[in-house]
Image: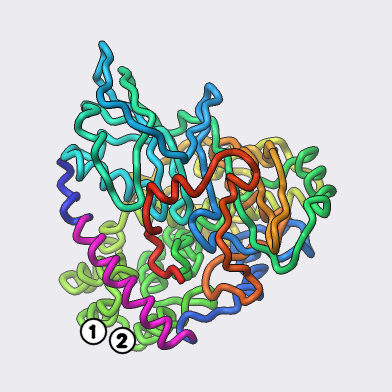
């Protein structure tokens, strides 16, 4: 069994406890969770390099409930892995039983979280639970997974909060990352006012004919689910690492804040600025909320034993540093995409700058000069998991838009995107799209079965099978 499983189980218990504290604190001191998210929206887009989006779009709010955001994986043969439960057979037979396949449906659970929970229940290593792509956490999602060396009898009776499995069959291969075709999305955007579907005709025609700019979305820059707020600053940290400024990257991660972060947590970072380098005091400070500040505590624990070892501390969080560098690369891509789009000189594809080919890096040279990151490869060497490889990304994506359906103070959008595309990026071409806390007063709180409303199944049946949402700050 995965050696990390017991650690992850303990972490889940800590999450449950901490989120309960946060919910209670929010009721007592709502000001600690208040931000003007409507005003912040355009600032965040600019901060992430998305400066060529349409303007003056209607206000829309997403993810009030996980069931407002449905993601159903599409396989390469066109199969849609739906969220609706099914009656399981008593037995399952096949000549080749090396791999068990099934659809896993989850709500309020991240993909990696789903992976370790299933591995824990099955008493197998996490590496034997494989999937094609990450799926949203604050959502109801369905995707095909493979369970190597697992028998149907081991899993058919398993019940986990926020997770169920269906559509079992045996095979000989395994699921590999990127082996799917894309995802079908059914999303309720709660709007400030009633909007007729016909009002989107010109925007839909534009997107269908020309596509939409393939920006890296908020998730790439450190989006936190469950409306806990986030600095969206992974790219800032990645830029410091790519300049070799490890001390500054460490200090920025530990103490810097901005208007995107919840005041509760921003205030703690401001306290941290006054006691920086007093590692025991910092450890005590971050220990007030050990789940939210989990990574900060890991770094500070290392620095308590090795006060001058900033690089060593960062190496303790190499997967996180990798995400920072990837975010910086994505930020540069977003900036270049915006610039070329506004100039009208957009090619069909753009390379990413983390390439060994100097021709791929050439379009980014002026950005790297401005940022002081020309020696990026030199400074990422201490982090061997950061790959240097060629990737060319489509600059525009076309969505297969199935329907737009008006409901009271909302619009249900049903569409399919290819893999490695962001549903929220597509929606940013139709709405001034906001999420997070606090929920604006104009957002309608009624729950809607969005699949039943447009006639493609039912959210209710999946919701009933999944049980209560795992989102900690549910109203």
Residue at horizontal 29 percent and vertical 36 percent from the top = 129
Which sits in the foreground, 290 or 475?
Answer: 475
Which type of secondary structure does the marked residue at label 2 adopt?
A: loop
Q: Estimate the x, y position of residue 456 in percent, counting from the top left.
A: 60, 38
User: Can you say whether 307 is above or below 121 in the image?
Assistant: below
162 on left or right of 393: left
Q: Which residue is mark 2?
A: 275
Q: Estimate the x, y position of residue 288 in percent, counting from the top left.
A: 27, 80
Which type of secondary structure does the marked residue at label 1 adopt?
A: helix
Q: Earlier in the sequence, mark 1 or mark 2?
A: 2
Neighbor class of circle 2 (other Cα within 10 Å; few <14, some 14-19, many 20+) is some
Q: Which colour style is shown?
A: rainbow
Q: Main secondary structure of the magenta part?
A: helix
428 on left or right of 121: right
Neighbor class of circle 1 (other Cα within 10 Å; few <14, some 14-19, many 20+) is some
User: Can you say whether 47 is above or below 283 in the image?
Assistant: above
Residue at horizontal 25 percent and vertical 23 percent from the top = 91
The answer to whether mark 1 and mark 2 are in CB contact below 8 A is yes
Q: Is residue 451 visible?
A: yes
Q: Which residue is mark 1?
A: 281
Which sits in the foreground, 332 or 8?
Answer: 8
Q: Quadrant of residue 242?
A: bottom left
Q: Which residues are magenta?
A: 9-30
Q: Is residue 26 magenta?
A: yes
């Amino acid at each position: 069994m995965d050696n990390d499983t017991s650690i992850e189980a303990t972490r889940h218990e800590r999450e449950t406890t901490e989120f309960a504290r946060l919910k209670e604190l929010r009721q007592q001191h709502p000001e600690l969770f208040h931000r003007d998210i409507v005003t912040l929206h355009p600032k965040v887009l600019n901060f992430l390099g998305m400066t060529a989006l349409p303007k003056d779009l209607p206000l829309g709010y997403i993810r009030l409930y996980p069931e407002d955001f449905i993601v159903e994986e599409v396989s390469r043969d066109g199969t849609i892995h739906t969220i609706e439960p099914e009656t399981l057979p008593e037995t399952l037979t096949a000549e080749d039983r090396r791999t068990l396949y099934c659809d896993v449906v989850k709500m309020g659970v991240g993909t990696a979280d789903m992976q370790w929970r299933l591995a824990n229940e099955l008493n197998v290593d996490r590496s034997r639970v494989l999937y094609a792509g990450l799926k949203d956490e604050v959502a109801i999602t369905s995707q095909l997974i493979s369970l190597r060396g697992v028998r149907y009898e081991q899993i058919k009776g398993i019940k986990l909060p926020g997770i169920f499995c269906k559509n079992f069959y045996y095979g000989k291969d395994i699921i590999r990352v990127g082996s799917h075709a894309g995802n079908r999305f059914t999303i309720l955007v709660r709007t400030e006012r009633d909007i007729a579907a016909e009002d989107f005709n010109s925007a839909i025609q534009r997107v269908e004919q020309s596509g939409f700019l393939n920006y890296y979305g908020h998730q790439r820059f450190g989006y936190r689910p469950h409306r806990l707020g986030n600095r969206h600053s992974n790219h800032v940290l990645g830029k410091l690492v790519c300049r070799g400024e490890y001390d500054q990257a460490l200090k920025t991660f530990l103490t810097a804040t901005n208007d995107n972060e919840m005041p509760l947590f921003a205030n703690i970072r401001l306290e941290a600025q006054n006691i920086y380098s007093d590692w025991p005091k910092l450890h005590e400070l971050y220990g007030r909320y050990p789940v939210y500040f989990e990574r900060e505590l890991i770094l500070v624990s290392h620095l308590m034993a090795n006060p001058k070892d900033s690089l060593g501390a960062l190496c303790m969080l190499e997967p996180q540093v990798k995400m920072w560098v990837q975010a910086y690369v994505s930020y540069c891509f977003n900036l270049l995409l915006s610039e070329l789009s506004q100039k009208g000189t957009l090619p069909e594809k753009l390379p990413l700058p983390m390439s060994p080919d100097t021709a791929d890096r050439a379009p980014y040279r002026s950005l790297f000069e401005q940022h002081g990151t020309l020696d990026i490869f030199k400074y990422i060497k201490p982090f061997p998991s950061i790959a240097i490889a060629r990737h060319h990304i489509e600059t525009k994506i076309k969505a297969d838009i199935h329907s737009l359906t008006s409901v009271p103070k909302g619009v249900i959008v049903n569409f399919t995107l290819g893999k490695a595309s962001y549903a929220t990026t597509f929606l940013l071409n139709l709405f001034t799209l906001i999420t997070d806390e606090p929920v604006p007063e104009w957002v309608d709180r009624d729950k809607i079965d969005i699949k039943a409303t447009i006639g493609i199944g039912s959210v209710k049946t999946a919701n009933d099978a999944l049980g209560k949402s795992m989102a900690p700050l549910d109203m």
